[in-house]
Amino acid sequence: MAIRLIASDVDGTLIQDSTPNLYPEMEEAIKRLKERGILFCAASGRQYQSLENVFRNVADDIAYIAENGAQIRYRHRNVSVTPMKREDVEGIIKMLRPYYGECEAVISTPEGSLVESRNQTFIDLLTYGYHNTFRRVKDVLEQEDEIIKIAVYHRDSIRELGESRFIPAWEKNVKACMAGEEWVDFMDKSVDKGNGLKILEDYLGIGRQEAMAFGDNDNDIGMMQAAGESYAVDTAPEHVKKAAGAVCPGWRKKGVYQIIQAKIFGE
């Protein structure tokens, strides 16, 4: 069955973590895919506004599974938005606050993010690395915004802290997962890139066997399982590779582009 939808994780799979630009060859591939009636979808823990910046030269030609699937957009409209329960938001924020200074947090809404941090290095990362849309606030819990994701960051690696403390503390109540080496994400229990891909497939009338997916971390496993053809990059943890149908080169060797060139364009 012919591929009609290609979904790819962004950071660590398609491009280097926390960088703002997509390489020209991939932009051209996305345009060629559109000409063949194949939709490309950026699937990421990033907010929609950050993704739109990365794909700015082809922004109108693709779909978006943002915030790990908490927000799905296509053709300038929300296909799906899934908020977190207020009691979960309050509990997670209160858990994280003693770690502020060691860690930083970004609280996502459909319109952008809320940030309590006063760490200028982290603010610069959000501004110039991710190109996030965000509002600095004194107390997130005093805001009335609809919260769709909480992300906690630790420079270089959060894996030990995330897997030993943050994820076990909340995985029974919410979806809690590693989202790259430096991030742990919390969303509503129903939110997953895999569910996001299924929602998009249903919305577009595309079957599982007509979808291809690429990923590199725990939050990509559901998405790879929701696609008929899937690839984990060679830098992914072993359990992520085992969840995928095959392994491909990572972002340094433009592995996603290589597979599209070979499998779709026969080049």
Image: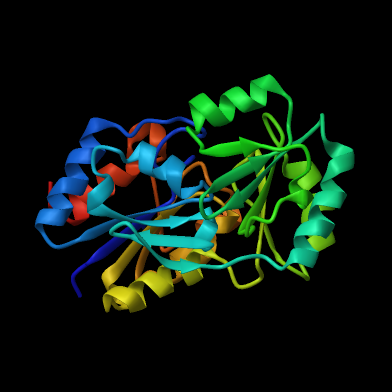
Asked if one can make out residue 158 in the rendered structure from this viewpoint, the answer is: yes
List x then y, in percent, for residue 179: 60, 49
Task: Farthest residue to the right: give it.
Answer: 98
**Image coloring type:** rainbow
Q: Residue at x 45, y 64 (%)?
A: 224
List x then y, in percent, for residue 44: 48, 51
Label count reads 0
Q: Residue at x 77, y 50 (%)?
A: 142
Quadrant containing the N terminus is bottom left
- Residue in front for this viewpoint, 49 or 62: 49
Question: In screen coordinates, is 165 left or right of 198?
Answer: right
**Quarter location, residue 103:** top right
**Quarter location, residue 186:** bottom right
Asked if one can make out residue 208 in the rendered structure from this viewpoint, the answer is: no
Say if 27 sits above or below 167 in the image. above
Say if 45 sits above or below 39 in the image. above
List x then y, in percent, for residue 236: 53, 47
- Residue in front for this viewpoint, 159 or 100: 100
Q: Residue at x 60, y 73 (%)?
A: 190
Q: Residue at x 69, y 29 (%)?
A: 155
List x then y, in percent, for residue 137: 71, 38
Task: Farthest residue to the left: give it.
Answer: 35
Say if 209 sits above or below 133 in the image. below
**Quarter location, residue 13:** top left
